[in-house]
Image (cartoon, helix red, strand yellow):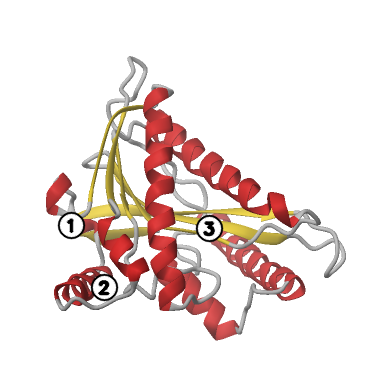
Amino acid sequence: APGSRGGEPYRAKSIFVFQAVEGGLKGADVVVCGLFLHEYAESKSVHVQCLDSNPLYSSNSQLEGERRQHLLTTVVISYIEFAKDLGYERVTVRVPPPTDDTSCLFSARSFSVRSRACVHLARWYSQLANRCHKAGLASGVRSGRTVESVDFPGAVLSSEEVAAECAFFQMLERGEGSAAVQEAAKAERFLILHIASSADMPRSIVEPPSMLPESFASSREAFVRACVEDGLRFHQLPLAQYATMMLVYRLLVLQHHRASLLCREGPGPH
């Protein structure tokens, strides 16, 4: 779906990952990961707006964390490779501070959980960026604690995200917060990854029109709002399976409606 931030138009893109599980509702998959992105074709830059996940449902809980980390790493690196093929040259990432209560997709988290998650996610992104650099996918990586420290394009942030950043720095100035909050203050939450160039990279970015230009999946805010309005929950397997079925159903209905409109309009100019 189209949008604009800082005077530059962007294309909003969402990626969801589903898991086939045993138990719960028979034969029903569950969504376990969501990635929301803003693609700025003019500046050839991609901003990662949100990355969130549910626990992977497995009989071996000891391997769940490791498998989830592997899944998230695979999703993000695969997208960066895809972005490179389209001609994008830069990826920006902001790890939400504990004061940002809008950063979650599937389940609300307490302040203390968000504090710990901020530290872990910043470390994970740093490791992922270094992995991309070693693999030759990235030509350079910069990370820092503030927007100014890495010349991060603050215009890509929403007003809610800017407010959360201000609230976090004000909290630190007052000397408030637990040990986890102080650790979050030390985390390098702003990251810029420069995609390695190649001879076959296109000079301009051209993508086909979206089949779903506007839907609940077109932005993080719209997705969360749809889940709240429909009372969808993901903290238990049967509930997560039901919520997933409802989300997929809504997407199919929207896609069918969009396809019907395109058929009525007829083929466009060649």
Number of residues whose C-alpha sits closer than 10 Å to that of mark 2, classed few (under 14), some (14–19) or many (20 or more): some
In the image, 124 versus 241, the foreground residue is: 124
Q: Residue at x 62, y 47 (%)?
A: 66
Q: Which mark is residue 34?
A: 3
Q: CA distance from mark 2 to mark 1?
A: 13 Å
Q: Residue at x 53, y 58 (%)?
A: 34
Q: Three-letter amino acid code at disc 1?
A: Gly
In the image, 79 versus 95, the foreground residue is: 95
In the image, 99 versus 178, the foreground residue is: 178
Q: CA distance from mark 3 to mark 2?
A: 21 Å
Q: Three-letter amino acid code at disc 3?
A: Gly
Pointer 1 residue: 154
Quadrant in the rendering for residue 41: top left
Residue 79 seen in render = yes
Say what secondary structure mark 2 lies in.
helix
Q: Three-letter amino acid code at disc 2?
A: Ala
Quadrant in the rendering for residue 31: bottom right
Residue 60 lies left or right of residue 3; in this view the side is right
Number of residues whose C-alpha sits closer than 10 Å to that of mark 1, classed few (under 14), some (14–19) or many (20 or more): some
| Mark 3 or 2, nearer chain start | 3
Residue 252, image x, y percentages = 65, 63
Q: Nearer the viewer, mark 2 or mark 1?
A: 2
> Which corner quadrant holds the N terminus?
bottom left
Residue 102, image x, y percentages = 39, 73
Pointer 2 residue: 164
| Mark 2 or 1, nearer chain start | 1
Say what secondary structure mark 3 lies in.
strand
Residue 11 lies left or right of residue 186; in this view the side is right
Number of residues whose C-alpha sits closer than 10 Å to that of mark 3, classed few (under 14), some (14–19) or many (20 or more): many
Q: Nearer the viewer, mark 3 or mark 2?
A: 2
**Residues at badges 3 and 1 in contact (C-beta under 8 Å)?**
no
Residue 100, image x, y percentages = 34, 72
